[in-house]
């Protein structure tokens, strides 16, 4: 049995009075791709964002239960959130490169950590761009503005930006939903490559995508985790009737 | 009979419709005329000020002799005509003074304004931000003459004492420094308000992207938010410098009206194009009267060129927003 | 997070606090300065008094009897009182800071009430001699003249030791800003009357009638350029265009209120056009379409449906315009001049509150006190306008929501 990166026990999450997640128990395995699926509003994105505490940015959000990352409860008072986010990177639904050069985008995270040495930064940028399979396309114009890239390239740049922090985990929130099929394919290939080195948690709307790229799949419905298992099993013989209904397209 | 009736109703309808359309056309013309009037004023301004402003250069000004254009634009001394019976007017040094002062005031008001905007938009708690927004609105609504009054009542005294501490004798505080301070206070609300809007409109996704990379809130604000809002911030700077170049009454109360220059030292008296135009008001004819229009032409050209250059730079810097 | 990073963050955070503090400090300082310097002179008399004092030369006919009123208890210690003449005087300072002697009390049986106007050409004419006026000189037959600079005490003792008075020169207080206030109001009225219709019609044309073509774009950008023109340039235009025009077609013979109003109207046009257009843009197209579908023509739709919905915006534009008129100084120095007047004619020179401040500050020595008092008046008006605009836009937003 492989190592657990995240161990979530009895997680409840509220937006004001509205309960968005209830009683979630899940383990995220190391160096695997875990896909979170479910209809819109089922809480899968909320769950993803609670893993690097991005939900903190919403005032009305409150959480009970615990999320253990490398055996520390990340919601403990005094926990270093910024440190957590350097270890748990995130890629968003819409590519969101900063309005600066490609180089500066990738170097942003390390620079925020106080790395100033140009040689080290050069190396980090290069290797991150290579890992994100975008280096060949941009190596001649690292000083060009990131917003001049195409949507697919921007998203891979955002992945490179996350990789530059050398995180343990990369969270991906529907990373291909704003992209065309060819760009989507490239990102999917990239994800399969990346799982050698990183643990990946990906929220997706697209069940074929979940089936293609993930090792584990978790099915969320109405803020509850209905079922989680090996992807093969979920898609061929789900335990729950609701999972089967969703996968076979009866709702959602 | 029935047919006639039917016909007449139809005719009435057509007549009515025609009348309605007729009104439409008349009203439309009326509105168009208003618009043409509104739009024509800028042309009137240019034509009439140019016509008046050219007089000192092409006539002999009642025996004083015509003003030399090159000397006017490049010289470093301003002699009032009727008093000295001279045509030795020059605005060369005044152009430099004006640009120098506008630039210095922007050096103070831009960082201060942008930081205030950042504070209001991203740092301050909601209530404090609301309060500060009101403060900025109030500052913007204070007439420039009141800034001038404040300048000569408070800033002059401050500058005078400050110079005194440094062992410099200033002319009652009338100086480059006082002018710069007054102008930076005046442009501060403009810059703050416009920058705040552009900072607030930076997308949440960019902000979250930075936070998710382990950047702190402050790092995000300074490195990403400001970079994303830069085109709005630049626009605010352009407006601010425009206001600094064109401000007249407040400047005339604190500049000290130097007759020669250019003045680069902080505690020396200076003069700007606008403050020069406010001199010699007693005249109603003659060269001292006409020369004001010449200075007006120079002021308009300076503002126009500054705008063109700054907008060019803005395009260069901000071409990222095209995509 | 490392300590160094925390420190850096803290530093950057602090400078934003500092910057915001400067904005607040500036506002407070301006208000504080203006109020501390100006509050002393702020009273109702200032707003209603003439700027120039009216002087009277009074003398007494034979056959008066002296007063027998004792000093009333209501008068304070520093009032010097002459029982004989029934007159109480006090030392004070005027709005320019010069020493003056003010008439604090005149007894009902004072012989001075019987004075006649020495300067009158139509025989004997009685003149007003009341409390609040100031005495600049009293001349006697039997001794030297008592003047303001000797003070109230000396003046009273001189009075007590004489039986006759040759002449009393006294005057109203003056230094009031009634003239500037009236000019400002005239200017607001005339300017709005010129600029508002043209501005609104232009905005309607641009937003409702104009096609999307090159000519519209040119018109629009010509108007847009006006916003960037500094007000002193508008002043020059007023001097070059409107002053000669008004001299030619009206009875005016110099810069006047009408030329000033036209100049201000041009300054205000872009402000009014923009604000009106903004509010026209908010009116939903469905409203226009449903009116047109009911058989109304374009004009009817515009006047009956679109314009009423845009009314709050137009009101805001008007208030903004008023604020601008009150605050404007540079353009008006050229377009109506700096002459402080008490009798206001729209064909004559006069000055607004803002320009009045400028003139006072340009004088040697500058009269900061009176300038600050005027500034208080201006700030009060501007503040009130601001509050009203806020209320209107809040209401507007609420109504739309």
Image (tube, coloured by chain):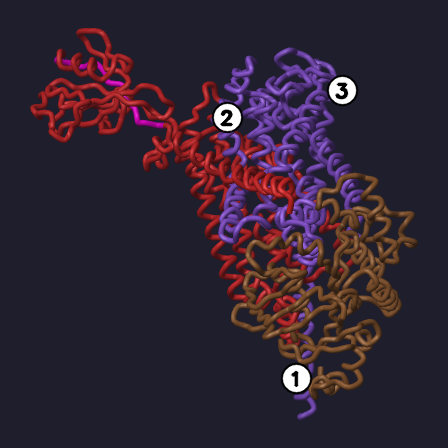
Chain colours: A brown, B purple, C red
Q: Secondary structure at mark 3?
A: helix
| Quadrant containing the N terminus of chain B in the rendered view | bottom right
Residue at 8%, 26% (x, y): give it.
C69
Q: What's the distance in space between the residues labelled 3 and 1, CA to CA?
A: 78 Å
- N-terminal of the pair, mark 3 or mark 2, is 3
Q: Say which of A134 and B134 sits in front.
A: A134
Tag 1 subunit? B
Left or right, B146 with respect to B116, comes to left
> Magenta stretch: residue B107 in it?
no
The local secondary structure at tag 1 comes to helix
Does residue B16 appear in this view?
no
State the residue position of label 2: B152
Q: Chain of mark 2?
A: B
Residue B295 is left or right of residue C52, and the answer is right
Q: Is residue C394 visible?
A: yes
Q: Is there CB contact under 8 Å for labels 3 and 2? A: no
Give how far across and how far down residue C272 sits, in percent.
59, 50
Relative depth, front residue between B272 and A64: A64
Please tell me in which quadrant of the rendered image residue C277 appears: bottom right
Q: C229 and A190: which one is in front?
A: A190
For mark 3, name the chain: B
**Residue B9's disc number:** 1
Between marks 3 and 2 in the image, the one whose residue lies nearer the viewer: 2
Location of residue A168 by image quarter = bottom right
Q: Which residues are magenta?
A: C163-174
Tell me if residue C170 is in the magenta stretch: yes
Disc 2 element: helix
Q: Which residue is mark 3?
A: B74
Residue shown at 49%/37% (left/top)? C25
* Vertical arrangement, residue C260 with respect to residue C197, above or below: above
> Viewer-nearest of labels 3 and 1?
3
Front position in the image: B124 or A229? A229
């Amino acid at each position: 049995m492989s190592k657990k990166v995240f161990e979530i026990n009895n997680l409840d999450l509220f937006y004001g009075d509205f309960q968005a997640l209830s009683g979630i128990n899940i383990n995220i395995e190391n160096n695997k791709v875990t896909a979170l699926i479910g209809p819109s509003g089922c809480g899968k994105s909320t769950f993803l964002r609670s893993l690097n505490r991005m939900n903190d940015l919403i005032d009305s959000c409150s959480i009970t239960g615990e999320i253990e990352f490398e055996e520390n409860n990340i919601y403990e008072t005094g926990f270093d959130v910024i440190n957590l986010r350097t270890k748990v990177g995130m890629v968003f639904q819409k590519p969101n490169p900063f309005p600066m050069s490609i180089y500066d985008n990738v170097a942003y995270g390390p620079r925020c950590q106080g790395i100033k040495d140009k040689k080290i930064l050069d190396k980090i940028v290069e290797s991150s761009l290579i890992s994100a399979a975008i280096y060949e396309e941009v190596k001649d114009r690292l000083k060009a503005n990131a917003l001049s890239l195409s949507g697919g390239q921007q998203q891979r740049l955002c992945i490179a930006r996350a990789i530059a922090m050398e995180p343990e985990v990369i969270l991906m929130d529907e990373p291909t939903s704003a992209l065309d099929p060819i760009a989507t394919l490239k990102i999917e290939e990239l994800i399969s490559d990346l799982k050698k080195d990183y643990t990946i948690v990906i929220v997706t709307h697209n069940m074929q995508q979940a089936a293609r790229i993930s090792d584990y799949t978790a099915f969320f419905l109405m803020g509850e985790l209905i079922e989680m298992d090996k992807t093969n099993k979920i898609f061929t013989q789900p335990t729950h009737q609701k999972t089967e209904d969703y996968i076979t397209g009866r709702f959602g | 009979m029935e047919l006639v009736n039917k016909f007449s109703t139809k005719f009435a309808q057509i007549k009515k419709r025609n009348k309605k359309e007729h009104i439409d056309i008349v009203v439309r013309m009326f509105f168009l005329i208003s618009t043409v009037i509104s739009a024509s004023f800028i042309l009137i301004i240019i034509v009439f000020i140019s016509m008046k402003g050219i007089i000192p250069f092409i006539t002999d000004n009642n025996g004083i002799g015509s003003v030399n254009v090159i000397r006017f634009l490049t010289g470093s001394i301003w002699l009032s005509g009727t008093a000295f019976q001279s045509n030795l007017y020059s605005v060369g040094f005044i152009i430099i003074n004006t640009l120098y002062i506008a630039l210095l005031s922007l050096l103070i008001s831009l960082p201060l304004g942008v930081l205030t905007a950042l504070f209001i938009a991203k740092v301050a708690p909601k209530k404090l931000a609301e309060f500060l927004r009101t403060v900025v609105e109030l500052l913007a609504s204070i007439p420039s003459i009141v800034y001038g009054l404040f300048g000569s009542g408070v800033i002059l005294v401050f500058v005078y004492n400050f110079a005194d501490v440094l062992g410099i004798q200033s002319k009652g505080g009338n100086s480059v420094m006082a002018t710069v301070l007054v102008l930076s206070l005046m442009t501060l609300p403009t810059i703050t308000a416009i920058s705040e809007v552009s900072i607030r409109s930076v997308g949440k996704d960019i902000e979250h992207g930075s936070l998710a990379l382990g950047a702190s809130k402050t790092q995000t604000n300074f490195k990403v938010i400001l970079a994303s809002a830069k085109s709005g911030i630049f626009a605010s700077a352009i407006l601010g410098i425009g206001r600094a170049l064109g401000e007249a009454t407040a400047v005339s109360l604190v500049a000290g009206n130097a007759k020669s220059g250019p003045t680069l030292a902080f505690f020396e008296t200076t003069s700007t194009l606008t403050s020069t135009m406010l001199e010699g008001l007693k005249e109603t004819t003659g060269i001292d009267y006409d020369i004001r229009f010449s200075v007006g032409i120079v002021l308009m050209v300076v503002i126009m060129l500054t705008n063109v250059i700054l907008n060019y730079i803005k395009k260069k810097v901000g071409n990222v927003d095209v995509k | 997070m490392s300590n160094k990073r925390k420190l850096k963050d803290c530093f950057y955070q602090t400078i934003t606090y500092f910057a915001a503090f400067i904005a607040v400090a500036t506002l407070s300082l301006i208000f504080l300065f203006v109020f501390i310097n100006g509050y002393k002179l702020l009273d109702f008399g200032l707003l209603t008094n003439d700027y120039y004092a009216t002087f009277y030369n009074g003398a007494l006919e034979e056959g008066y009897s002296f007063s027998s009123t004792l000093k009333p208890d209501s008068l304070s210690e520093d009032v010097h009182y002459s029982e004989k003449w029934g007159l109480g005087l006090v030392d004070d300072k005027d709005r320019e800071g010069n020493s003056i002697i003010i008439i604090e009390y005149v007894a009902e049986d004072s012989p001075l009430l019987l004075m006649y106007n020495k300067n009158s050409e139509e025989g004997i004419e009685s003149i007003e001699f009341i409390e609040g006026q100031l005495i600049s000189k009293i001349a006697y037959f039997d001794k030297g003249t008592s003047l303001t600079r000797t003070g109230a005490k000396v003046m009273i003792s001189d009075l007590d030791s004489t039986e006759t008075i040759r002449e009393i020169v006294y005057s109203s207080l003056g230094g009031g800003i009634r003239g500037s206030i009236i000019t400002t109001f005239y200017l607001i009225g005339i300017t709005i009357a010129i600029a508002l219709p043209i501005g609104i019609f232009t905005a309607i044309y641009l937003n409702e009638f104009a096609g999307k073509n090159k000519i519209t774009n040119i018109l629009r950008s010509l108007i847009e350029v006006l916003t960037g023109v500094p007000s002193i340039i508008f002043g020059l235009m007023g001097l070059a265009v409107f002053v000669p025009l008004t001299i030619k077609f009206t009875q005016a013979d110099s810069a006047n209120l009408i030329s000033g109003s036209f100049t201000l109207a041009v300054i205000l046009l872009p402000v009014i056009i923009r604000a009106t257009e903004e509010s026209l843009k908010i009116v939903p197209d469905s409203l226009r379409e449903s009116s047109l579908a009911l058989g109304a023509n374009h004009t009817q739709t515009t006047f009956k449906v679109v314009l009423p919905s845009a009314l709050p915006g137009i009101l805001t534009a008007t208030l903004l315009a008023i604020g601008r008129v009150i605050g404007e100084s540079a353009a008006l120095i050229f377009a109506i001049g700096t002459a402080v007047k008490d009798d206001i004619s729209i064909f004559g020179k006069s000055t607004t509150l803002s320009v009045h401040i400028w003139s006072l500050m340009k004088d040697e020595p500058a009269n900061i006190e009176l300038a600050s008092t005027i500034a208080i008046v201006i700030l009060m008006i501007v503040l009130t306008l601001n509050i009203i605009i806020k209320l209107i836009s809040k209401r507007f937003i609420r109504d739309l929501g």
